[in-house]
Image: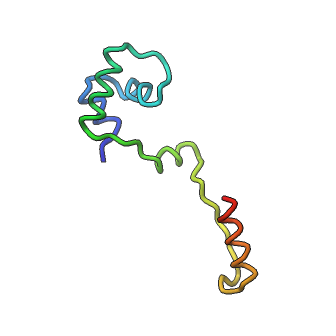
């Protein structure tokens, strides 16, 4: 998996610059922005959504503990939780 460090190395910029370009925040010189985008494309960079969710403490996961999963009462509750989520 390609990392931000790999993109930064190929584009010859800092990881902070890569982060700003990929998240579209902060000021980056146009030539550096172009180099980062070209490097990301050349390497096939895709953001790691799991890593991003963990950093933001937003895993989009719900933990439910039930005494008996085969009980139709709990199954209905779990189905509704899944439908709402």
Whole-percent x, y for residue 44 in the image = 28, 41
Whole-percent x, y for residue 25 in the image = 50, 23
Taking the image as shown, residue 71 lies to the left or right of residue 41, namely: right
Q: In which quarter of the image is residue 22?
A: top left
**Which one is in front, 82 or 69?**
82
**Which one is in front, 9 or 84?**
84
Question: In this view, which residue lies farthest toward the right?
Answer: 73
Taking the image as shown, residue 25 lies to the left or right of residue 57, namely: left
Question: In this view, which residue lies farthest toward the front?
Answer: 83
Rendered residue at 68%/72% (across/down): 78
**Which one is in front, 28 or 81?**
81
Rendered residue at 66%/58% (across/down): 85
Whole-percent x, y for residue 15 in the image = 37, 29
Taking the image as shown, residue 84 lies to the left or right of residue 8, namely: right
Taking the image as shown, residue 9 lies to the left or right of residue 47, namely: left
Count of marks overlaid on the render:
0
Q: Is residue 66 shown above or below 35?
A: below
Rendered residue at 46%/47% (across/down): 49
Q: Is residue 34 shown above or below 74?
A: above
Whole-percent x, y for residue 30 in the image = 36, 14
Q: Quadrant of residue 61?
A: bottom right
**Which one is in front, 73 or 28?**
73
Which coloring applies here?
rainbow
Rendered residue at 35%/20% (across/down): 33
């Amino acid at each position: 998996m390609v990392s931000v460090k790999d993109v930064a190395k190929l584009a010859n910029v800092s990881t902070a610059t890569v982060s700003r370009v990929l998240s579209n925040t902060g000021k980056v010189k146009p030539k550096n922005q172009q180099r980062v985008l070209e490097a990301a494309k050349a390497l096939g960079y895709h953001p790691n959504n799991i890593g991003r969710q963990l950093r933001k403490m937003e895993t989009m996961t719900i933990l439910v503990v039930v005494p008996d999963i085969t009980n139709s009462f709990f199954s209905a509750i779990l189905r509704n939780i899944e439908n709402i989520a």
